[in-house]
Structure formats: C-alpha cells, structure tokens
Image (tube, rainbow, N blue to C red):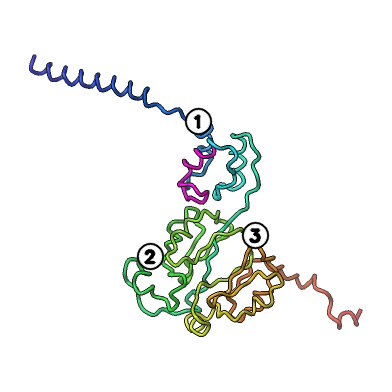
Amino acid sequence: MTTILIPVAIVAVIGLIAAIILTVLSKILYVPVDERQAAIREVLPGANCGACGFAGCDDYAAALAKDSSLSTTLCAPGATAVAEAIAGILGVEAGTVDPKAAFVMCAGNKEVTNTIMTYEGVQTCKAAKQFFGGQWSCSYGCLGLGDCRDVCQYGAIRIIDGLAVVNQELCVGCGMCEKACPNGIITIASKKNLVYVKCNSHDPGPATRKACTAGCIGCGKCAKICKFEAITVENGLARIDFDKCKNCGLCEKECPTHAIVNLRKKPAAKPAAEQAPSQNQEQKQ
C-alpha cells in the first residue's frame, strides 16, 4: 500500500508546487488590459483583412485604445456602423466612411479571348501563373481559377466564363482579393467611382487586340475626349485618375474596344403607355 501512496503523494506535491509557481508568475507578469481595447475589439468584424493598415483587428483595437486621435473609419468591412460604435466607445467624432469595393481590371472572359493550352496543374491562379503565365492568350489578364473568390469572406466574387466578377453590393472593399491576385488586376477604390478601364495589358495595341478583343489598345481617344484630364495613356494602357474623374461616361462611349466600363445605372425605358404620342396620333386628335 505504501508503494502506491508515495508516488501519488509525490505527484500531488509537484502539482501543488507548480500551481503555486503559476499563480505567483501570473501576478508578476500580469499585463493590464485596457477595457476600451476589449470593447473596440468586440465591435470589429474579425475579418483580419488588413485593410485598416494594421496586421489585424486586435492590432487596430490596441492602436485605437492607445491613440484616440487615430481614425475610427479605417475598418472597410465594418463601414459606418463599426466607425460609429468605436467612436462611441472612445467618445470622439465618428467621421465619414467612404464605402469601397474591388474592381477587376480585366474583361477577358471566354467570349473575347482564347486559351493557348489546357492547364491541368494545381487549380489556383498562383500556380497557373508560374506555368508559362497561365492558359489564356493574354498573360496580363484574369487567370480565372478563383484565388480571389476563395479568399473573399463575403461571397462577393464569382468566376463567370473564366473571369472574376465582383458583386459591388456585397463587396466591402477589404482588399483580400487584391492581395490574392497574382496578376494584380484587382484594385480597391471608392464605390463612387463608376467608370474604369477593364484592362491590364501593356502590350502594343495590335498585340493586345489579337489576344483579347475587349482589351485597351492605347489609342488615346478616351484621353482626348475627357474634359477633366482624368485619363492618361502609359505603356499602351489607359488609366483613369479617380480623383479627377466625374463619371460622365464620355470615355466609355468613345472607346472603340469597349475596354472602359460605366457602372452608372441606365434609366429604365418608359412603358409604351407613358411614351409621347406619335405624330400620326397627334394629327388624329
């Protein structure tokens, strides 16, 4: 019996000593947590996307707790609701949140471009790019294997006909897709920007046209017609300065390849009953 009790007693004593040591160390090494930091972390969405400029939600919450002058509007996924909640905790003005979204700078779906091979490797854009730049005739465009879709936590991206398509209403502009795209064709910008160039090719016009019929050929017509000097053509590709652009849409109408997209909603056509009467009807009346 004694041979059994002695080992048990030894283990119990060791456990007791360890518990005492851990208790003492927890008191010595205790770091007080700012209650405001915990409260801010609670209202952040937890996406850890890095759109705020910090490593994640924990770091952003810690920075806000230490410096109340830091902007409360940096959380893209949280938008206005989170900014107001943080401001309430800190007792500061919430400020205005500019909603952002992802824009895909490529129109190269299966209807306007072609494949140059059948890629059967690892089904990710990153892997496909390392294999001769991917399977599409344009090496600058969307690789179409959905790395952006896979990292999107909001279901805002789908792959349609080999091209990433963003649902602007679901997108919160977190930037995860932008980081995941190996060809760098996704950019994050304000949802107020309705006109943009849907192309990323820097090849000469004829080469771009051969690879994709919807590509920018660098003709410069858009730059010439723009009244706000918002468009420049560099390395064969038109770029729109969103700070100068007024979303007028003239460049979209002028583009010969339709590489410029205008997201402005077109007014719905009036029902036939509401349309103005024809000249014959007026004469009859």
Residue type of the residue flagged with mark 3: Lys
Q: Mark 1 = which residue? A: 34
**Element type where label 3 sits in the image:** loop
Choose the circle earlier in sequence order: 1 or 2: 1
102 shown above or below 271: above
Circles 1 and 3: CB distance less than 8 Å?
Answer: no
Residue type of the residue flagged with mark 1: Asp
For image coordinates 66% across by 39% down, the residue present is 93
Residue type of the residue flagged with mark 2: Lys
**Element type where label 2 sits in the image:** helix
Q: Residue furthest top?
A: 2
Q: Position of residue 121 (x, y in %)?
A: 31, 69
- Cα–Cα gap, marks 1 and 3: 37 Å
Choose the circle earlier in sequence order: 1 or 3: 1
Q: In which quarter of the image is the C terminus?
A: bottom right
39 shown above or below 262: above
Closest to the camera, between mark 1 and mark 2, is: 1
Q: Mark 3 = which residue? A: 192
Q: Mark 2 = which residue? A: 126
**Front residue of 77 and 62:** 62
Whether 55 is among the magenta residues is yes
